[in-house]
Image: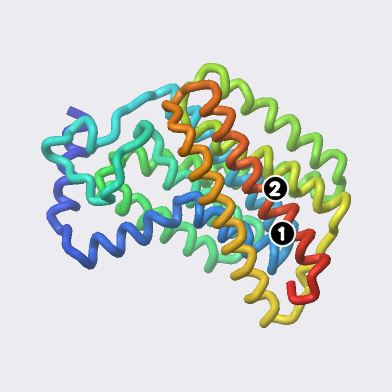
Amino acid sequence: MFLEWQKDLILNLQEHHNLFTEIFFRAVSFLGDPEFFFILLGFFYWTFNKKTGEFLGLTLGVATTLNNILKGLFLLERPIVAHENDVKNIRRIPPKGTSFPSGHAQGSVSMFSAVARYQGTYLLWFLAALVMVLMGLSRMFLGMHYLQDVVVGSLIGVATALVLYHFFDKFRHDEKKLHLFYVIVLLLLLPGAFFVGVEDFFRRYGLLVGFMVAVFIEKRFIDFSTVIPPKWKVFRFVTGSVFTVSVLVLLGAFVDAFGLSAGAPLKDALDFLHFFLVSIAGFALFPALCKKTPLL
């Protein structure tokens, strides 16, 4: 009964399906896709402030990894699977993974909340709240999630940003303690690889581990600067986005070419390596190119 009225809410939203609402909510949903995660993370890390980008990457990696651990514990079917005769798949992508909590909501809200908490402005908190509402409506409209999925995912996203900021702010001027904190976080999340059995866990954990390693490499061996003229910031951002997303897509195609089924040990290992290498490429290799190339 509890899920029935949430299903009815989804059906009420889908009654307003037309070309405009489909394009709009699919665009909103993109804010929770890996491509957007890397683009937004790159914007702050490459062109704005490396410390902000570092905190943003930490928050995103933890939030999305934790999300997949929770999905593996609850194993709730998506609305388009549980109610396939009623709820339409407006996203037009075959459903993958489980429903509770929403990964798109948790990931996107955690990122925007992290930016808002780090910068400490009411405008950014308003933007984070707006993303929370629109993402929730989007995921329900597309048939991917129930109301409970997006609400809980969003709340966990905000909580993740706030909790991590407490420790990040405490250790930000002591690199040894900060990196020790990163190691502790990675170890606390690692057991998810052994008992969760959720395909996306290895991708998100690979992103987090790769980003932490990339940040360490950048600090120790590269130390590129974000203090460049505005026009070059734009060029760097566009170049970095194209480079990183291209690596993401090409490595994804390479992994898919093996045709391995979800849950196979080799598939999990390749998924981890896929996102690990994308993080290294975007946040260690590309900064090295920025340091060596005058145009970047």
Q: Secondary structure at mark 1?
A: helix
Amino acid type of the residue tagged 2 in the rendering: Ile
The percent coordinates of residue 77 (x first, y second) are 29, 29
Q: Earlier in the sequence, mark 2 or mark 1?
A: 2
Judging depth in this view, the residue of 94 and 74 nearest the camera is: 94
Q: Position of residue 136 (x, y in %)?
A: 35, 50
Q: Which mark is residue 280?
A: 2
Marks 2 & 1, CB-CB < 8 Å contact: no
Residue 253 image offset from top left, x and y in percent: 49, 45
Q: Residue at x 68, y 31 (%)?
A: 186
Residue 254 lies left or right of residue 137; in this view the side is right
Q: Amino acid at mark 1?
A: Phe
Quarter of the figure with the C terminus: bottom right
| Quarter assignment of residue 22 | bottom left
Q: Position of residue 192 (x, y in %)?
A: 56, 23
Instruction: Describe the element under mark 2 as helix, strand or loop.
Output: helix
Q: Is residue 72 left or right of residue 202?
A: left
Taking depth in this image into account, of 130 and 60 the one nearest to the observer is 60
Q: Residue at x 68, y 42 (%)?
A: 210
Quadrant of the rendered image containing residue 8: top left
The residue at which mark 1 appears reads as: 286
Give whichever of 196, 286 is nearer the camera: 286
